[in-house]
Amino acid sequence: MSDTTPPTPPVPPVPPPAPDAVVPPQPNPYAPPAAQPNPYAQPVPYAQPAPYGAAGYAYAPRTNTLAIVGFVLSFFVSVAGIICSHIALGQIKRTGEGGRGLALAGVIIGYVITGFWVLYFVVIIVVIAIAASQGYSNYSG
């Protein structure tokens, strides 16, 4: 018997993956434990693997700045709020940005406040007209 072991055959090198091959993303070792995939979870049938580097969460669309401005202005200068909110609704429809609810709220609040101001001035004018038609005067003469 000899003390030498038989030579092992050389291991062939592993070829690199094809450029179009889908490589599953590896878990981030620095992520908090809740963000790690659950090793005990049941596999979802018919689920498509996420492409390499795919984001885990979808981002909300940007909020239209004019919708925010129109909403704020509708409380202070209601006519300007109505105009800005209508322009924002057109931009949101064209670009797909977020903020449609703010723009609608700006339009509605602007119209309601404008309606209250118009009603207030109409009541004031009617009261002045009724007082003027009474013919009462403090002046003696």
Image: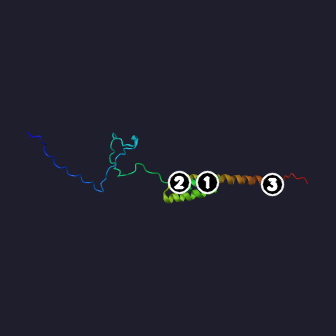
Task: Work out how far the residue at label 2 is from the one at label 3, CA to CA, in angstroms.
Answer: 48 Å
Q: Secondary structure at mark 2?
A: helix
Pinpoint residue 140: horizontal percent, then vertical percent: 90, 52
Q: Nearer the viewer, residue 85 or 16?
A: 16
Q: Nearer the viewer, residue 79 or 111?
A: 79
Q: Are marks 3 and 1 in contact (CB under 8 Å)?
A: no
Q: Mark 2 highlights which residue?
A: 100
Pinpoint residue 71: horizontal percent, then vertical percent: 58, 53
Q: Mark 1 highlights which residue?
A: 73
Quadrant showing the N terminus: top left
Of labels 2 and 1, earlier in sequence is 1
Q: Secondary structure at mark 1?
A: helix
- Looking at the image, which residue is at 63% across and 54% down? 78
Of labels 3 and 1, earlier in sequence is 1
Q: Secondary structure at mark 3?
A: helix
Q: Left or right of 9: which side holds 127?
A: right
Q: Mark 3 highlights which residue?
A: 132
Q: Amino acid at mark 2?
A: Arg
- Looking at the image, which residue is at 56% across and 59% down? 87
